[in-house]
Image (spheres, rainbow, N blue to C red):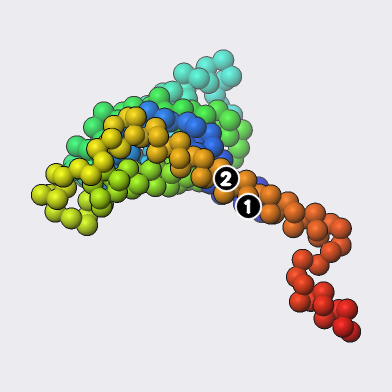
Amino acid sequence: MDKKKFKSTALNGLVNNPTFVLVLGMCPTIAVSKTLTGALGMGLATTAVLILTNTLIAACRKLISDKVRIPCYILIIATMVTIVDMSIERFLPDLYAILGLFIPLIVVNCIIFARAESFASCNPVGYAALDGLSMGLGFTLSLSVLGAVRELLSYGGLAFTFGAAERAREVMPIFQTPVGGFIMLAVLMAAFNAVYKAVKRAAIDRQNELMRGADPRPDKANKGVAA
């Protein structure tokens, strides 16, 4: 296994975050991120679909003709979404009541089809499954952060920190609306990209120092001069 490719695939969901960087799946992102519970549930459901879809498409990639690949991908995605939908309805009815129609709508989520077309269709099963896991967890993380912040600002706490009576009192109800969701998404997106660019710039500067032969650790450099 190529360690460099394994690392890049595993970190792809964070580096190229589906929500904060690629800006995919905005419909479920805004609709179900009113609370941490809904956001986490949708993220994990999407992750399961991504893993299953990527794995099956990668396994069948040599059998699917280019002329019919789009209908085949849609059929595979719809089948996996149906399995996940029925499983959640059977084993997690409370979560199913929260997510409702948005579970079947995973079929048209841009993230699913984008990973099937750009990665799973041209990579082995192992890498495809890893990509599905990575992108799914990246989507879950961004969705959960957005859901937690919106819930905190709307109610003054998360669902498990107070009772139903306190839950009924909204502090800033605007963050339960689509407008508030987009505002908070923009703030978090800007913060994520600012931090990512700063980290990337620091890594490039360090690499340039190493290429010039400079030791970035001043203690060892001083010891060398003293010697």
Label 1's element?
helix
Q: Report crowding for label 2: few under 14, some 14 to 19, many 20 or more residues within 10 A (C-alpha).
A: few
> Residue 159: image x %, image y %?
22, 51
> Residue 150: image x %, image y %?
32, 43
Q: Is residue 10 visible?
A: yes
Q: Residue at x 60, y 37 (%)?
A: 123
On residue 194, the disc is 2
Residue at the limit of the structure toward the left, as seen here: 165
Circles 2 and 1, Cβ within 8 Å, touching? The answer is: no
Residue 92 falls in image quadrant: top left
- Above or below for 73 versus 2: above
Which of the two residues, 37 or 225, is positioned nearer the viewer here? Answer: 225
Q: Name the quadrant of the C terminus.
A: bottom right
Q: Which residue lies under the disc numbered 1?
A: 199
Residue 154 falls in image quadrant: top left
Amino acid at dot 1 = Val
Which numbered mark, 2 or 1, is in the foreground of this view? 2
On residue 102, the disc is none
Question: Marks 2 and 1, Cα distance to the nearest angstrom?
Answer: 9 Å
Which of the two residues, 23 or 56, is positioned nearer the viewer here? Answer: 23
Which of the two residues, 50 or 224, is positioned nearer the viewer here? Answer: 224
Residue at the limit of the structure toward the front, as seen here: 171
> Residue 219: image x %, image y %?
76, 76
Amino acid at dot 2 = Ala
Label 2's element?
helix
